[in-house]
Structures are given as structure tokens and as C-alpha cells.
Image (spheres, rainbow, N blue to C red):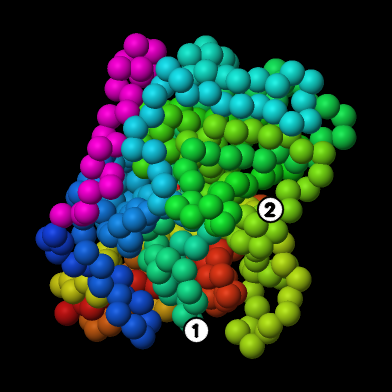
Amino acid sequence: MRSRRRFLSELGAGGGALLAAPALAQSLVDLRFPGGPSTRPMTSAFPQKGAMILQRARPPLLETPMEVFDGSVFTPNDRFFVRWHWADIPTSIDVARYRIAVRGHVGRPLSVSLDELLRMPRVELAAVNQCSGNSRGLFQPRVPGAQWRHGAMGNAKWLGVSLRHLLDLAGVRPGATTVRFGALDQPLVPEAPDFAKSLALDHARDGEVMIAFQMNGEQLPLLNGFPVRLVVPGWYSTYWMKMLNDIEVLDHPDDGYWMAKAYKIPDTPNANVSPETKDFPSVPINRMVPRSWITSWSDEARLAFAPRLAMGGIAMGGDSGVARVDLSADGGRTWQPARLGPDEGRYGFRRFDADVRMPGPGTVTLMSRCTNGAGVTQPMAPNWNPGGFMRGCVETTTITLS
Ligand SMILES: Nc1nc2c(c(=O)[nH]1)N[C@H]1C(S)=C(S)[C@@H](COP(=O)(O)O)O[C@H]1N2
Ligand SMILES: [Mo]
């Protein structure tokens, strides 16, 4: 735990280089998307960030390289992915003046300072922050939007104050249904819709949704929402409002652009529709689904043949934990269970490992398949929707043994 003094003294660090152009690319990485250019520069030019895949410079979209996930189930803060919608992002924060408003359909509107927040009772949990469009670049047919491979996700131990605590202090009035969140970032043009997201009141009051001021034992990097962000365990990161400064209780649904138009998924199993379907009922994206990735070997690796190969990776259960992970080395014909690493709670990553029998020299298709605590198993077939949201199928890693 950092003392309050430390917390305050480091504030605003690192914002200065934010608007500077990234340094000339040192190297390129190939994200191996089907049919289309898929190389990206690596960059280390962003404040408080190490080597990241540069998806876009302004506003910054930085993807975590896959090998980072092999090192630990907790993603280091300096390798944690970054995504912003609008380019007007504060480059430093005056922590003495920072306030979080709690207003709207409440008995006592609040203006909470960081000092006050740091003195409130705390909650801590591990949770995966995953962009709704993570792995979008693998959609076929291709869809518009950030062309991420699998690195628009990260797992951290989040420390903060439960949103319920703040709402209870403000006294939510009867008739309230919804809580809307706003932040310091702004669109560059006034016509564009300011980023805002909301949760149903019962969800907002579940005691786990939190206003986090630390990730992995450190203050948040500026690009990950310093000084505070919302953490919505088990739900896609579109709800995880960074630089949160506004909490508004509503007595009606949020019909703003970011809830009513954007981030909508087909109201079908796995948010799946055929590309020909034009009209379908849709709902705001919500809970995450189980996923898993082999991280011990990269796609297209060439290795010496041995009868058994050590395979490992990370899995997530969505909102209900990892119950089991099975591995295949024959394209999904046969499966064998993996050993699971320590359980860090139902919202985090979980390590898996196994020695798997190899069919023989040649090209081998490796797969991992997670079953979550609710009994949901990753499907073999990819889903498709026009937003490129909620990919959850079994992923493949192709290696050559000789
Ligand atoms: N204030 C603010 N919060 C935001 C966003 C944003 O544009 N502005 N983007 C959301 C989306 S879509 C994602 S994927 C996550 C990314 O979190 P990260 O940058 O910490 O990885 O932030 C979420 N919170
Ligand atoms: Mo996102």
C-alpha cells in the first residue's frame, strides 16, 4: 500500500509526452489477420508504457504483445493495453482539485475529493479488463473498427471503493433505475457525443463494481485512467470508465449514443448473426464469455519433434471463473485436461499447463478450450456480428515439428 503522501506526490507524472508523436518504429509485428495487411509498429514512446503494439497514435490505441501474458496472470501496468475514443485527454491531473460528482436522483449530491475517497472502506479483486472488440481483426468477413488481435485485454488486482458505498452516502431516491458515468476526456468537436456509459442500479450497487485508484499495487497509469476508473468485474471494458469524475443517478434508462446506438450486440446466442442478416434485435453488450489462449508457443513456431510438448497459457471464465481447460494437439479431435494454476477469483485470468502428446512431426494444430464455472464451454465455431464484438471461440496455434 502506498501512503497518501506518495500517492499525491506522484500525481500528474508522465502526461507530458502524451501528445508527442511516437518515436520512429524500431520494429514491426505481424498480427496475422486473414486476408489483408496486418503488420503494426512496436512503440515505447508512450508515458508509463513499455513496448506496445501501436494500433493508433491519437487517441492512443496500444495493444499488449501476446508474450506478456505468458509471464504472469497479472498484466504489468506498463504493458497494459490502452484504448480511448476521443483525442482530448488530459495530460496531467491536478489531484488536489479532482472531484467525483455523485448527483441526479439522490438525496444528498456529493462532490468527493481523492483525499476523501482514499479514507473510505476498500474492496480489492482481480478482474480482466477486455475490450468488446478484442480479436476483431480475426472476424471474417472483416468488419470496421480497431483491428485488434488478442491483446486488447489485461488482468489486474484492482483496489478501490465500492460504488455502492458512494451511492449509499448520496442516498439513492426511490424510482432510480440507472447510474450513468462520465469522465474528463472530451471529443475534439462539440457535435460528437461525449463518452458516457451506464449500468442498471442493482448492478451498480452489487458491491463489486468499484471506483479503483490502484491496479497491481500501484496508482493507475495516466493512460489507464489515472486517478480513478470504474471496474465492472465480468463485463466488457466499455463500461470501465477511466478518469471517472461524474456519477449520475437517473430515474429513466440512458438513451444516449453510447448506450442506445454504440456497443450493441445481436440478441442471439454468442451475439452471432450471419453476415447477410440486416435486421436483428440488439442489446447493449454486457457479460464476458469464457476464453483461453496458448501463450507458451507463438503461431508458426518451429520446434524439434518430441513425443510430448509442454503447453501453457491463460484462461478466463467471463463472469464465473475457470472450471477447466482442455487441450488438443490434433485440431480438436481429442482433448486432454490441463492443470490449473492458482485461483485468483472468478473474474481474473487463470494459468493452465500440460504436457501434451504430439501426433508426429509436421504441422500441428494446438488448441485450448475453457469451460467456465457456469458450465459454458468455448464453441469451436467463431461468432460474427457487424461490430466485431464478443469473440469467444476456441483459438488455434499452428506450429511445425521437425
Ligand atoms: N473515459 C473513458 N473511459 C473509457 C474509454 C474512453 O474512451 N474514455 N474507453 C473504454 C473502452 S472501449 C475500453 S476498451 C477501456 C480500455 O481501458 P484501458 O485503456 O485501461 O485498457 O476503457 C474504457 N473506458
Ligand atoms: Mo473497448
Q: Of residues 328 and 301, which is closer to you in this image?
A: 301
- In the current view of this chain or complex, which residue is farthest to the right? 174
Secondary structure at badge 1 equals loop
Are dots 1 and 2 in contact, CB under 8 Å? no
Name the residue nearer the viewer: 387 or 139. 387
Q: Earlier in the sequence, mark 1 or mark 2?
A: 1
Amino acid tagged 2:
Gly
Residue at figure coordinates x 54%, y 32% from the top left: 245
Q: Quadrant of residue 179?
A: top right
Question: Closer to the observer: label 1 or label 2?
Answer: 2
Residue 76 relative to residue 255: left or right = left
Tell whether position 4 is magenta.
yes
Which residue is identified by label 1? 141
User: Which residue does the numbered mark 2 point to in the structure image?
Assistant: 256
| Amino acid found under the numbered disc labelled 1 | Pro
Q: Which residue is depicted at the point 18% across and 74% down?
A: 302
> Left or right of 33: which side holds 208?
right
Q: Is 349 drawn above or below residue 296 in the view shown? A: above
What SS does tag 2 mark?
A: loop
User: Relative to residue 76, is residue 376 depicted above or below?
Assistant: below
Q: Using a 10 Å C-alpha cutoff, classify the residue at mark 1 as few (fewer than 14 neighbours), some (14 to 19) or many (20 or more).
A: few
- Bounds of the magenta segment: 1-23
